[in-house]
């Protein structure tokens, strides 16, 4: 038993490294890759995104394939994984698809100063966890492990990616590169500024490269826990 889940960070980027356009969501995948991501989701116990992704993209974060949902149910699991988000301001809408879709539990890690507001707003639709004075991803990961999460999928956005990567909490990075440019420095990139454990002196290990239609999947092994497929 590990003190944090096996953590897989999954992200699609444009050829110039952006994960969205400045104003709107951007389709950076294709059907075959969506299906691959669906299989990865089905293999995890929890899926996490930041509050800005919940607000901007309104994602459902469900397993789409009925066969995969049935397979999870047969294993005694909820049809889709638990959903997890993190917020400081607690300005999340209880009517967002994140909260209203799927049977699995929804967890909201909230900075202590706004936990009361978060419970008032989201109490009926989610479990609000006091994340401490500032929510640290290391403590959040430990708490998820204590709740039985063995495999965590992190699906964005840039702020959340940055914290998981700089804290060296990611075992596997699945980076999809889509054949488009965004070309707008106001748009969010894959990560924000930070001190990352991988640099010219310590290069990450590229474990696999796969072409999926017009996108390419790069799998990086970022820890000794990396599980080869
Ligand atoms: N291409 C892809 O694969 C992909 C995937 C997902 C998202 N995206 C894109 O990513 C963009 C959003 O990225 P983003 O960097 O702006 O946002 P984000 O990482 O989704 O969320 C950031 C927000 O999460 C909360 N948060 C993060 N860390 C926290 C901490 N330690 N303590 C407390 N709260 C914390 C804060 O919420 P509050 O503001 O509520 O305090 C913060 O504003 C969207 O435009 C979306 O389209 C792309």
Image: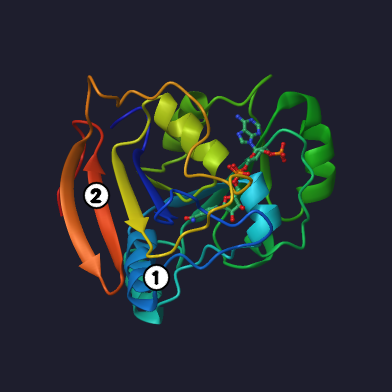
Give the image's coloring scheme.
Answer: rainbow
Spot occupied by residue 184 in the image (x, y as percentages of width and height): 58, 51
Mark with earlier residue (2, 1): 1
Query: Which residue is depicted at the point 45% across and 28% down?
Result: 142
166, above or below 191, in the image: above
Please tell me how many numbered marks the rendered image carries: 2
Spot occupied by residue 84 in the image (x, y as percentages of width and height): 56, 47
Query: Which residue is depicted at the point 31% across and 72% down?
Result: 214
Spot occupied by residue 124 in the image (x, y as percentages of width and height): 76, 54
177, above or below 157, in the image: below
* In-image side of 3 versus 124 (left or right): left
Quadrant where ligand 1 appears: top right
Q: Label 2 CB, ligand 1: below 8 Å?
A: no
Residue 206 seen in the current view: yes
Report helix, strand or loop for mark 2: strand
101, above or below 4, in the image: below
- Residue bearing the label numbered 1: 34
Badge 1 crowding class, 10 Å Cα cut-off, few under 14, some 14 to 19, many 20 or more, is: few
Q: Nearer the viewer, residue 84 or 1?
A: 84
């Amino acid at each position: 038993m590990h003190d944090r889940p096996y953590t897989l960070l999954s992200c699609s980027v444009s050829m110039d490294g952006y994960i969205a356009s400045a104003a709107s969501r951007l389709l950076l995948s294709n059907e075959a890759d969506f299906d691959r991501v669906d299989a990865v989701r089905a293999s995890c116990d929890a899926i996490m995104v930041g509050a800005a992704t919940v607000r901007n993209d309104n994602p459902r974060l469900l397993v789409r394939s009925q066969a995969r949902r049935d397979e999870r149910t047969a294993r005694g699991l909820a049809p889709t994984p638990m959903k997890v988000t993190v917020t400081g301001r607690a300005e999340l809408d209880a009517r967002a698809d994140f909260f209203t879709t799927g049977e699995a539990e929804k967890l909201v890690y909230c900075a202590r100063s706004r936990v009361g507001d978060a419970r008032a707003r989201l109490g009926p639709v989610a479990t609000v966890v006091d994340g401490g004075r500032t929510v640290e991803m290391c403590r959040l990961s430990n708490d998820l492990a204590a709740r039985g999460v063995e495999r965590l999928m992190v699906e964005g956005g840039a702020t959340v990616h940055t914290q998981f990567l700089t804290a060296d909490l990611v075992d596997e990075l699945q980076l999809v590169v889509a054949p488009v440019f965004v070309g707008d420095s106001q748009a969010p990139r894959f990560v924000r500024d930070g001190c990352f454990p991988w640099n010219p002196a310590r290069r990450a290990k590229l474990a696999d490269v796969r072409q999926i239609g017009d996108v390419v999947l790069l799998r990086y092994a970022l820890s000794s826990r990396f599980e080869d497929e």
